[in-house]
Amino acid sequence: MSLTHEEFGVGVQQVRQNAELSARVALSVVVEPMDSKLTPLIRELGAQRAWSAINGNEGGHFDRCQPRVRALDLDHVLWNTQQAGARLLFPGLPGWPHGLDDLEFAPFAVWARGSSSDVDWARSVAVVGSRAATSYGLHVAGELGYDLSSAGYTVVSGAAFGIDAAAHRGALAADAPTVAVLAGGVDRPYPVAHSQLLDHIRANGLILSEAPPGASPRRERFLARNRLIAALTAGTVVVEAGLRSGALSSAGHAERLGRVLAAVPGPVTSAASAGTNAWIREGRAVLVSNAAQCVELVAPIGEGLLSPERAESVLEYDDLAEVPRRVFESLPKSRSTTVDRLAVIAGVSGPEVMAALGSLELTGRVERSTGGGGAALRVRRVSDPRARWAV
């Protein structure tokens, strides 16, 4: 689904005039995204009823929320949203990525900067991996970002150092939109060193976060952010990840959501690829080595199919049956030999050697070096297999 800028998200004034949307914004500020105690209750009650219960601390069940409730200034949150040039995405309204509905704890709202006019969530792929990436990982991620974008797929990642940034840059090099999902507010570039990169992403795609503008990134928000990356896309590709890499968090969410999960293998000596290699070995991720293989996995059934990979070079005996091949492989490289000698080396009978030599002669692979027959017949390889055989 592609949207025009006018259809994209909800503006601040609309939120102020709608109690349901205002409640969702308030919940986004007060409740952490993956609060296992509160989010199931909120989902059961609905946004407005839940916000009323939390705001009034009904039954004393919401003590943990009260410091934030007292500090909340909803008008200031909406003013920050407007100042950041952001819009809000809500479930069921234009611009909402429907993949987020598959989450156990879906966001109450998502802040967005940029434009979704060229973002097709059905044709999107998450490319994630280690911050401490190797040159190999950076090269692969950049190639994937470029080639996936060139194939019409939107690359989604987290704008972190390493693999994330390389994937975004690859997409931007292809003049394609890319989506960065942040752990802090959309107005707080993180890492700060990627401020310029995030500006380019915003100009060509989207920056998303379920944290309000001004919110700082914290560890639990990075883990929550990873579930969004997995849910937004049709599949996740992990390029490099150690055994305890945070990128495997995104992979785990993709696995639980039933999304396509793929991984790029790395050197067995590289700690940076220990996690991806393990997931491939355990059958949890499909091995991929290029964008075309990723597209084959996430494309609608019947699209993006690849032909089976075959060796680029064809050996001169690949088309031979077993006995002719054994006889041909037994021929000396640079001198002639006899039928009896070939029978011993190839482990076949004399008549089988003669029959094999007949077919080899017909295809120009051997030639007789002397006249005669039987054991006296001497044959040798033809230096150019395309040459005609000669007596």
Image (cartoon, rainbow, N blue to C red):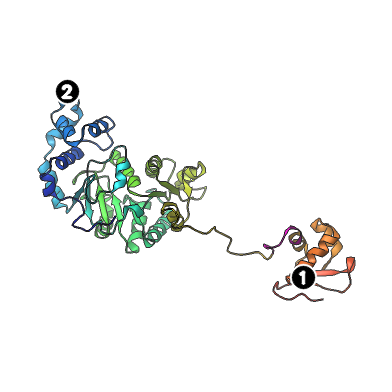
Element on which disc 2 rests:
helix
Q: Is residue 3 left or right of residue 380?
A: left
Q: Which image quarter is the N terminus in? A: bottom left
**Which x, y percent locates residue 159?**
31, 51
What numbered label is drawn on residue 59? 2
What numbered label is drawn on residue 219? none
User: Which residue occupies the extreme top position in the image?
Assistant: 59
For the point 77% across and 70% down, the residue is 361
What numbered label is drawn on residue 361? 1
Label 2 neighbour load within 10 Å: few <14, some 14-19, many 20+ = few
Asked if residue 34 is positioned above or below residue 388 in the image, the reply reads above
Label 1 neighbour load within 10 Å: few <14, some 14-19, many 20+ = some
Q: Is residue 110 left or right of residue 171?
A: left
Asked if residue 359 is positioned above or below residue 19 in the image, the reply reads below
Q: Earlier in the sequence, mark 2 or mark 1?
A: 2
Element on which disc 1 rests:
helix
Q: Is residue 35 left or right of residue 152?
A: left
Quarter of the rendering containing residue 350: bottom right
**Which x, y percent locates residue 109?**
22, 43
Q: How many marks?
A: 2
Q: Mark yes or no: residue 235 visible.
A: yes
| Structural distance between the alpha carbons of marks 2 and 1 | 95 Å
| Segment tinted magenta in the rendering | 317-324
Q: Is residue 311 magenta?
A: no
Q: Main secondary structure of the magenta part?
A: loop
Amino acid tagged 2: Gly
**Which x, y percent locates residue 306?**
49, 58
Q: Mark yes or no: residue 135 visible.
A: no
Amino acid tagged 1: Glu
